[in-house]
Amino acid sequence: MKNGTKKILILRLGAIGDVVHTTIIPSAIKSAHPDWEIHYLTQSENIPLLGNNRNIDKIIEWDRSKRKSFKYLISTGVKLFREHYDIIFNLTNAIRNIFLSVFACPKKIVLRKHTDKSWVEDYFYTAQSVIKDITLPVRLELEVNKELDSQITQTLSAYPTPHIIIIPGGKTDSHRQGRTWNLENWIELSKRLTEKYGGTVFVCGGKGELKHHKPLEEIAVLLTGEYNLAGSSALLSHADLVISGDTGPLHIASAHNVKTLALLGSTSPDKIKPYGENGYYISADTDCKYCWKKKCKYTQKGSTPCMDKISVDMVLDKITKENLL
């Protein structure tokens, strides 16, 4: 690179929410150094989410289906080596990430720093530890495909406002205990939201959650499984309010500066609440909250105490108090 510009790689393969959080780094760097070149290595599934990001110059695909292939690992390492990076931000401690970082032979490898602040700020301070003149952005940034955006706008125009998106999650997601709210609560909340505010409640999620979400069909517009990641991002960007447990889509909505209300149980708001001025959260006062465990020893039929203690009234009171609708 010439004239003092630098070439940087951000390495974060998986987890949608974490990928969204890491976009604070290219935003901060490009604000201070618009001529620097920023690349991002991530798994195939995340590429539609980052593809329109104006702060990322090049996206390098990691094919997760080949993750056990040593030949594929080496070929990816060679691809990175040929880029001659000045800095690689390796944001996980996975062995393959460390291998790729070292194989690429950048001038500097920077590992993720952990602070007492939010995860978004952790990523920012990781970058600031070596790029001293960057400043913390007040919000995350995501962009959507213009054609997709136009299609979503047309679809939503057929429904009365406000447009409220709920993300109930899956009934039997063993990796998200302490992050999912009881479906009966979502049903009651949807009814009471439309009674109080009018408008339309939309239900979003992956195809595998469709059967679980079916009972909501009578009181809400069921869009579960209708959109891929890029389409879901475009949809979330148009919401008047998004309500969700700690999920990737919650953080996508936050990155679009949409009003987001997180229902938090096992994960702490100090680290994971939606970033920015439009991010809000509710958590109940239980002795076991914020345990960060993937499985709850107190769970009954998939329901956990930390989430059960969050009532529909608490959610509605928060919406009213904060004037979210």
Image (cartoon, grey):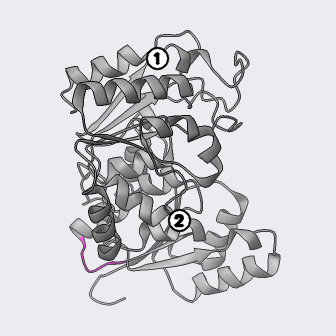
**Relative image position of residue 309 (x, y in whole percent):** 50, 13
Whether residue 240 is visible here, answered yes or no, is yes
Residue at 44 percent of width and 43 percent of height: 119
Is 211 placed left or right of 125 in the picture? right
What residue occupies the far left of the structure in this picture?
323
Which disc number belongs to residue 46? 2
The Cα atoms of the two marked residues, 2 and 1, are separated by 31 Å
Mark nearer the N terminus (2 vs 1): 2
Residue at 44 percent of width and 15 percent of height: 311
Q: Is residue 54 magenta?
A: no
Circles 2 and 1, Cβ within 8 Å, touching? The answer is no
**Relative image position of residue 139 (x, y in whole percent):** 26, 50
Q: Which residues are magenta?
A: 33-37
**Relative image position of residue 266 (x, y in whole percent):** 56, 26
Is 111 placed left or right of 77 in the picture? left
Residue at 54 percent of width and 78 percent of height: 60
Q: Nearer the viewer, residue 94 or 187?
A: 187
Report which quarter residue 12 is drawn in. bottom right
Q: Disc 1 marks which residue?
A: 310
**Badge 2 density bin: few <14, some 14–19, many ≥20, Cα 10 Å:** many
Quadrant of the image containing the C terminus = top left
